[in-house]
Structures are given as C-alpha cells and as structure tokens.
Image (cartoon, grey):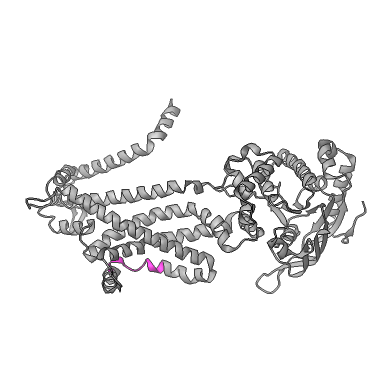
Amino acid sequence: MSRRWQRSGKRIGPALAGAAGVLALAAAWEAYKALVPDDGWVLGEVRVLPRTSDVAMPHLWDMAARAAEPLTSAPDSPPLWLATLQGAGFTLGVSAVGWVTGVVFGLLVAVLMARFVPARAGLLPWVVLSQTVPLIAIAPLVKRWGAQLEIGTFDWQDWMSVAVIASYLAFFPVSVGALRGFTSPDAAADGVRLDLFRAYGVGWWTTFWRLRAPSSVPYLLPALRLAAANAVVGTVVAEVSTGLRGGLGRMIVEFGASASADPAKQWSPIAGAVLVGLAATGLVALVALGLRRYRVEETA
Amino acid sequence: MTAVVVSGAGRVFDGGSGAGTVALADVDLTVGEGELVSLIGPSGCGKSTLLRLIADLDAPTSGSVTVFGKPADRAREDQDYGIAFQQAGLLPWRSVRANVELPLQLRGRAGRAERAARAAELLALVGLADFADHRPDQLSGGMQQRVAIARALARSPRLLLMDEPFGALDEMTRERLQDELLRIRASTGAAVVFVTHSIAEAVYLSDRVVVMSPRPGRVVATLDVPLGGPADRAARGIELREDPAYFERVSAVREALHSGDTAPDRVPS
C-alpha cells in the first residue's frame, strides 16, 4: 500500500511539489498579511516585522486584477500583463545573449587554464577577483565604453552593454566549473584514462576533445544553470543601473516610483522576472537533454 | 627478435628535498617474442613502475628500455603495444563497441566499416558479441575488463602490457578471465608483460615469473614455469590448477617472495 503510494508519488512528485510550493508561498503571504497588523510589529523603537499595509504588501488578487488593467491611463494603453510579457521577452533575449557570450568566454578561459598550467595560476585569482567588483559600479562604465565604440558601420546598442554585463556574471561559474571538469580525468582513478590516451600517442587537443571535454559535462551542467540565473539577475540589475528601456528592470524602477499610488503595479514585472528565470532554467534543461549521453556516472 | 629489453633501468622519484625515493634500482629484464612474463611482488616493489617504463608512461632515471628494438617512446608513438589496467577505464559515454574502436579511431586510417568489423571480431573473441551496443555502466566489472582487453588488442599489437587487470575481480571471474587470456594469447601469439599480486595467477599464466622486492624496487628471482604452451594450459583448465607440478611452482614462487633478500639470480627450475 505505502509502496504504491510512494511509486505514484515519485512519478507526479516534481510537478506536485512545485505547485505545492507556489501555493504554500501564496498562503504564507496572505496569512502573514492577515495576522500581522498593518504597521508591522514594533518592539520599542525597532520594527521587528515589516508592515503589511496594502502599499507594502498588496493582496495577491489585487496584483492579479491590476495586471489585467491597462498599463497607463492613456486610451490605447495595452493591459499591464501584456506589457510585462513584452518586457520579460526583451529581458530574456538580452539575458540569452549575455549567457551565450558568458558561456563561450568562460569555456575559452577554462580551456586556456586547462592547457597551460602557468595560465591557471595566473588567471584563476583574477577570475575570482572579477566577481568581487560591484555590478552597479561597472554598469555605467560599460555603457560609456560601448557608446564610444565604432567599428565600421557597426553601431553599439545600449542593450549590448547590458548583455556584456550579464555575460560578466555568467562567465564565472562556467569557467570554474569547466576547469574542474576538464581536469577531472587527472584525478579520476589514478588517471587511468589519461594514461590510456598517452599510450595511444595522441596529442593534447585530441585528448581534450575525446576525453577532457566529454568528462567535463557533469561539472558543466550545474555551472550552466548557475550562469543562466546569473545572466538574468545581471540583465535586470544592469537594466536598472544603465536605465535601458524595454526590459523588466526599468519597469520595476518606474512602477516602484509610483508605488504609493498604485502599489499592485510593480508586482507584475517582479512576477515577470520570475518567469524569465523559469524560462532560462528551462532552456538550460534543454541543453542538458542534448548532452545527456555524457551525464553518465563514473564507471570503473 | 625480443619484445622487451630493459637494461640497468632505475627510477628515482624526486622527494623535492634532494634525497629521492628509489622506486626501481638497476633492473634487467628481457621478454621474448610471444612470451608471457609476470612481475610479482609486494606493494612498492616497483612492478607497476617497471611496466610503466616499458609503456613509456614514465621515463627511467637511469638505464634504458627498448621495445622491439626501438626506444620505448618510439614504440609508444608507433603503438607497438596494447595496454590494460586494473581499472577498465572505459569511456562511459561511448557504447561498448565505440570503446573498443577508440584506439583505431584515434590513430590510423581505418574507415568506419573497417573499425566496426574489427570491433565485432574482438568482442566475439572476449565473448561479448551480444553487448556491443550496451553502455559500460550496464556491464559487470568482469565484462568491463574484457572490453578493456578487447580494446588493448584493437591494433593487433605484438605486445600486451597488463597492470593487475584482474585485481579488482572476484575469484571465479578472475579464473575465467585467466583462461580467456591464455586463449587470446594462443590465438594472437602476442608477448605479454603481466603485473600481479597473486602467486597462483602468475604461475598459471606465465612462462616466466619475475619476483620483485621493495626498498629499493628490484628483481630478486626469475623462475621458469614449464607447464606447457598457452593453448595447452587453457585446454587443461581446472586440471592444471590441481597439477602437482603447478603446486610445486607456486611453492617456489612463494619461497622466492618470502626470501626477498636472496641474491638476484635465476632459481633453477
């Protein structure tokens, strides 16, 4: 009896757990709003629990209702949900460009570090250091550099600056993960596969394509997923700090500015950002599906 | 022509502080064409190091190694030997067939069809014809090791180097694979250098057993095993394992192993 329950639970488990998670989150939101007074909880001078007023925490149904209404009071204004979806599409596109750029760059850095051991010692600290630079600080710089760029008829667009910033965040997990993957044959079972390739008398690049690259896939996939999340966050934050129009970042800032008058409005682009994150994760899952042949567990 | 000539070979591993570890000191070894020679000894006696020197996976710090009359590195470049380790080391993302084809694919001009034909032939030889499309992780340890042996034979080498290839297998599987190795050896005529921990295995398989001793790694005795040719042995199977002549050789090897400080010369057979 319990076995059968377990088995069927396994099959529909992920979808069920996902739905349950969303419902639990929604319930927690509304429960908190219902239980805690509008002004939050103040102990002496310190507010220990945040406000639950309609400005700070609108009801979920208010958010949904607001999404169905027009974006602005202009007569030909599209509904808010459509504007949000368009913004999400834009942000997803820029994130995707940033992700691809970051992945390519990250892989190149990893190959360089795997091929030349001195390069590893020289590059790896810089790769780590690169991530300690605050994004907010470099975003306007990248935008300015981009604006000065002129290569023939090629015209640097502002969204490209945002994609560059997204790629800056995306390349890091890829380069670190890929390096671990590329060098994993060195550690695995006394390097017996490397010995084998050496016995075949083939060079570094053949060994790379036939052994190191395929071996890296189990290490690379989590890195690609992390890079996708980083690219989305990087895109939204860079949209905010460069003021790029068209994406969710700008919408969140703009709607946030009028939050006291229209508090439910800004939650649409926030939900949109969640959707972008889900879409990005889904796209990486497709990549993983294409590489599933290489995801085999280590055999003797 | 001889398959392997090792003369005065030593290998010192740098400890970094000047005084290195002597893994192998002044080893002489000759393996004739078609001969099966086992290297046996306790851990740290340098038997694997010696095999790696022959394979040119490591270089001697003194002395020389020649394989079929060439320096070891040339022989490796020319793929004059096939090699198998204790770990099968199959590539888990490739099918069994593709694993056997790997050496043919990496080097040489064999076309797709030719490679597939050769792989089929080899898998039949090790009794895995029905498993060509399986993945390595679907096979047992013994089957994986057979795939590794088939892969080592892919380019029909005249020399097979084996580093404890059956070391991780259970006794039953091990004995079955020993018979298989004898059969393969009879049909290919390749010389074999076989590293093992097992006295019984060394005696059962070898024409000659080289007994080694640690600190420093060196050869302390070489014993002939006149129990007949490989085809003969494979045919006798269990009966050979119970032959008094076999037991006598097992005792001789055991004695040589336990008197690790005997003078390094040939014990008469």
Instruction: Please report the residue visible at 67 percent of the width from the left and 46 percent of the height from the top.
Output: B118
Q: Position of residue A151 (x, y in %)?
A: 31, 72
B7 relative to A22 in the view: left or right:
right
Q: Is residue B115 left or right of residue B23?
A: left
Quadrant containing the N terminus of chain B in the rendered view: bottom right
| Figure check: B23 above or below A57 | below
Q: Left or right: where does residue A11 sit relative to residue A147?
A: right
- Along the line of sight, which residue is nearer the eye, B14 or A287? A287
Residue A13 rendering spot, x and y as whole percentages: 38, 36
Which range is magenta?
Answer: A128-136
Mark yes or no: residue A258 visible: yes
Residue A173: quadrant of the picture: bottom left
Location of residue B240 in the rendering, given as x and y in whole percent from the top left corner: 85, 39
Within the magenta stretch, is there residue A135? yes
User: How far from the left and from the top, in percent, is residue B6?
Assistant: 80, 63
Residue B168 belongs to the span the image colors magenta: no
Identify the residue at horizontal 65%, vertical 72% (top origin). B16
Which image quadrant is residue B48 in? bottom right
Q: Residue furthest top?
A: A1
Residue for point 18% across, 47% down: A81
In the displayed structure, does residue B115 sit left or right of residue A214? right
